[in-house]
Image (cartoon, rainbow, N blue to C red):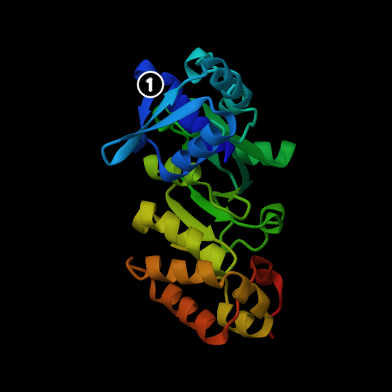
Amino acid sequence: MSRALRAALGKLCRAQDDRLAGSQLSSAQRKALDAFARQTGSVQIQPRGRGVFYRIVQPAVVERHWRDLTPIDADELDADLPKRAGNIARARFSKRSLHSHDLHYLLLKAAGPVQWRDGAGHRLDLDLATVRQGAAVLAIDNDMRKDSGWHTAGTLWLVENQALFDRLDWLPDRMHASVAYYGGQLRKGLIEWLAARPRAARVRFFPDYDGVGLLNYARIKERLGDAVQLWLMPAWESRLRRYGNAELWQGTAREFQAAQRRLTELVLEPEVLELIRTMQSLGMALEQEAVWVDTT
């Protein structure tokens, strides 16, 4: 309610002559402002034709409630203030409205000699960073206009679970490969960063074979097209039959259905279509770590 009231009072306070047409409010904002008017008597509701107007009759009361909800007006904030700090100033809550950070960080490891370069001629020796520090990180700005152009000539692998990032012995080809850990949910900013320009010779996507993993694949496939491919672990069908999890399948069934609808509109590899059909027929999902489990 406070969010709707904040928006309604903001519109009312900015309205000419302290009068606001009800048609300028959403249904939730009208409901909140109606309740506020009844409780405080500081706003008058005036019928007008088929609608109503709201008029401030006790400005001091409205101003006090407005400042309780919004300590600082948006146009008074420093333009360089971080978004979440601005949300606290405007709404006393960092996650109010648009609260994403301007940057997010991509963890990378090297398998073999790997170089990354940006548009300014800087280099990242990912192999050396992996040996010395265990991993490297790229800061990705959600504003693609500030993209620094980092890219590599090798293959970029995206993995969902940390175990696959910690140990790289599952990789089918360890030469000139970068492995990135995206942690369960694929950020929209990462997808857009990958779509902005070619970042690698090939992009291989290796998620859990469940609804969440396939929905993430649908999202990145829609943006990258043939530049990204889902990787299927060797003997995936026998692993799915032997080690598949029905509870995980059921828990991500909604995401699976959404992914299936979106993926059917794309041109997919026959093996991926077979994976989807087999998961559905067995009612099983398979986690990434099964790549290490013996199939015999």
Camera-side residue of 257 and 153: 257
**Disc 1: which residue:** 15
Camera-side residue of 146 and 8: 8
Q: Is residue 229 above or below residue 24?
A: below
At label 1, which amino acid type do we have? Ala
Label 1 crowd bin: few (<14), some (14–19), many (20+), radius 10 Å: some
Residue 125 image position (x, y, % from top left) = 59, 35
So how many labels did they put on this image? 1
Q: Residue at 47% of width from left, 76% of height from top?
A: 276
Residue 216 image position (x, y, % from top left) = 50, 58
Q: For the N terminus, which image quadrant?
A: top right
Q: Residue at 53% of width from left, 80% of height from top?
A: 279
Residue 117 image position (x, y, % from top left) = 48, 33
Residue 61 shows up from this direction: yes
Say left or right for 119 vs 187: left
Residue 220 image position (x, y, % from top left) = 44, 54
